[in-house]
Image (spheres, rainbow, N blue to C red):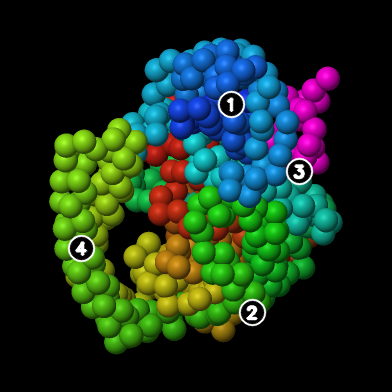
């Protein structure tokens, strides 16, 4: 009697007969042998069917199966280092649950729009499978980090009566005739809970109506937001530093095989060790205007132009090879994918060639008092091999709740944490303003209605203490950890400008 097993468990069943339940990921034939690549959600396994008796009938049935047919495959497990996963199944039995035809996402080349329209099926590809498993482990590591350190989870509302991060990015909703907004942050609410529990966090979806189509922006994303009482800016920074080191270490330990699928250079992640770099905003502004940045851009432009020319030549060669007589279908499909990848890289490079002079000009003319933009963050992140804290921004360009610096009232006691390799901001945090009158003044300066924040001001009326916290965006962090160039692959169903299906 065969034992039901998963592909992840095959190492425990070498020499035994097992039944795998899964879906046909791919197949190929060498004439007398048929190789079925089965996936079952835990991995891939090569299942080998021989054409000779007694498996000849199985061979004929399996040969007709289309991609993503659902199957139960029985056979003997044997170790095979050359096979995907290191084990394979010598097939002795096959039960077809559903024979599929016309599965739309084939091994042939597909553009990103085609794939995003079929996101519900794209999950099944190895790359997307690996990304979402890494995301799962990251989310689990985040929860474990705070739960194991005495933080209390506070679930905050998604409907909010007022802005938390600036009115220009609010999504308005009709709430039984009253205008409310999708939450930009849970922070203000966890500040209230922090006064009861000392150390708290919220973890949930947040929404920003930013009309941006950059690779870093989603309109719906997940944030982890811890808040701690009796804390100054350094306490919050130290918490963020320890937290990031711990979650990166956990994902590295638990998802090595997924990183291999993605081709991620994990040495970059292994370098994420304390201490992180620390720059003040003023130091960052000087760095942006430096010759070091100018020379970096000049080298970027020279490299981009050279690589673009290489790709144009490569694309022409591969197109000629693909259209040559006698090319086998599998080879043609492989070339088509390579051409598509090269064209996407070329489009990125041509965009970079157009934009680099503009980014050079912005950096060279950066004015003190301006907030750091995405381009500025990318520059600063690229100049460091570990995450870098940027601290003490001008108060005027930051949120109303950030504490005024006592030595220089122009500044806030805040920070952003920039991920290396050019990924930019993954955390924003601050010490919170605990002085009632100063906080009132900032609310007025921002043009906000004080009556909307009376409950928040109560926290400064009744037992105010020094406190602070931060927010980490899960999707930006996944993009950095996985080495992805676009944030849309980091979340199961991406919501962006013009993208809300499926």
**Which residue in the structure is indicated by mark 4?**
310
Kind of element beneath mark 2:
loop
* Front residue (pair 486, 44): 44
Tag 1 or tag 4, which sits nearer the N-term?
A: 1
The local crowd at label 1, few if under 14, some if 14 to 19, many if 20 or more residues have their Cα within 10 Å, is many
- Extent of the magenta region: 1-20
The front one of 33 and 131 is 33
What is the CA distance from the residue labelled 4 to the residue labelled 1? 43 Å
Figure quadrant of residue 44: top right
Evaluate if marks 4 and 2 touch, with contact meaning CB atoms under 8 Å apart: no
Q: CA distance from mark 2 to mark 3?
A: 40 Å
Does residue 175 appear left or right of residue 228 in this picture? left
CA gap, disc 2 to disc 1?
Answer: 55 Å
Sort mark 2 into few (<14), some (14-19) or many (20+) by Cα contacts within 10 Å.
few
Q: Residues within 10 Å of mark 3 (few under 14, many from 20)?
A: some
Residue that carries the numbered disc 1 in the rendered image: 49
CA gap, disc 3 and disc 1: 20 Å
Circles 4 and 1: CB atoms closer than 8 Å:
no
Residue 226 at x, y percent in the picture: 69, 56
Q: Which residue is mark 2?
A: 275
Earlier sequence position, callout 4 versus callout 2: 2
Tell which circle, 2 or 1, labels the residue nearer the N-terminal end: 1
Depth check: 371 or 160 in front?
371
């Amino acid at each position: 009697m065969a034992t039901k097993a998963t592909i992840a468990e095959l190492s425990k069943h070498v020499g035994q007969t097992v039944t795998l339940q899964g879906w046909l990921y791919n197949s190929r034939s060498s004439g007398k042998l048929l190789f079925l690549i089965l996936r079952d959600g835990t991995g891939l396994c090569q299942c080998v069917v021989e054409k000779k008796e007694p498996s000849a009938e199985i061979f004929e049935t399996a040969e007709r199966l289309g991609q993503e047919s659902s199957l139960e495959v029985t056979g003997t497990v044997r170790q095979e280092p050359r096979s995907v996963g290191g084990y394979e199944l010598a097939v002795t039995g096959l039960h077809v649950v559903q024979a599929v035809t016309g599965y739309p996402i084939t091994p042939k080349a597909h553009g990103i729009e085609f794939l995003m329209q079929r996101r519900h099926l794209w999950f099944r590809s190895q790359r997307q499978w690996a990304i979402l498993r890494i995301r799962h482990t990251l989310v689990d590591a985040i929860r474990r980090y705070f739960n194991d350190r005495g933080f209390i989870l506070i679930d905050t509302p998604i409907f909010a009566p007022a802005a938390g991060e600036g009115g220009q990015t609010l999504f308005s909703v009709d709430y039984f005739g009253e205008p409310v907004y999708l939450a930009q942050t849970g922070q203000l609410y966890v500040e209230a809970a922090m006064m009861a529990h000392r150390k708290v966090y919220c973890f949930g979806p947040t929404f920003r109506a930013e009309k941006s189509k950059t690779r870093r922006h989603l309109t719906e994303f997940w944030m982890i937001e811890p808040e701690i009482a009796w804390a100054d800016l350094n306490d919050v920074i130290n918490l963020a530093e320890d937290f990031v080191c711990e979650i990166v270490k956990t994902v590295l330990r638990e998802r090595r095989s997924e990183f291999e699928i993605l081709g991620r250079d994990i040495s970059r992640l292994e370098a994420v060790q304390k201490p992180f770099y620390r720059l003040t905003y003023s130091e960052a502004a000087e760095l942006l205007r430096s010759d070091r940045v100018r020379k970096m851009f000049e080298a970027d432009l020279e490299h981009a132009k050279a690589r673009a020319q290489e790709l144009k030549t490569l694309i022409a060669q591969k197109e000629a090879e693909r259209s040559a007589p006698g090319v086998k279908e599998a080879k043609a499909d492989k070339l088509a994918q390579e051409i598509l990848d090269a064209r996407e890289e070329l489009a990125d490079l041509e965009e970079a060639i157009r934009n680099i002079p503009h980014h050079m000009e912005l950096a060279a003319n950066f004015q003190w008092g301006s907030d750091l933009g995405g381009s500025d963050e990318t520059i600063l992140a690229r100049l460091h091999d570990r995450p870098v804290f940027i601290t003490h921004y001008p108060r005027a360009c930051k949120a109303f709740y950030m504490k005024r610096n006592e030595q220089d009232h122009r500044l806030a006691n805040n920070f952003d944490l920039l991920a290396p390799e050019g990924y930019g901001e993954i955390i924003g945090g601050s010490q919170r303003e605990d002085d009632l009158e100063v906080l009132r003044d900032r609310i007025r300066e921002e043009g906000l209605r004080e009556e909307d924040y009376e409950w928040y001001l109560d926290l400064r009326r009744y037992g105010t203490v020094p406190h602070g916290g931060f927010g980490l965006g899960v999707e930006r962090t996944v993009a950095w950890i996985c080495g992805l160039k676009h944030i849309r692959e980091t979340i199961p169903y991406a919501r962006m400008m013009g993208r809300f299906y499926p």
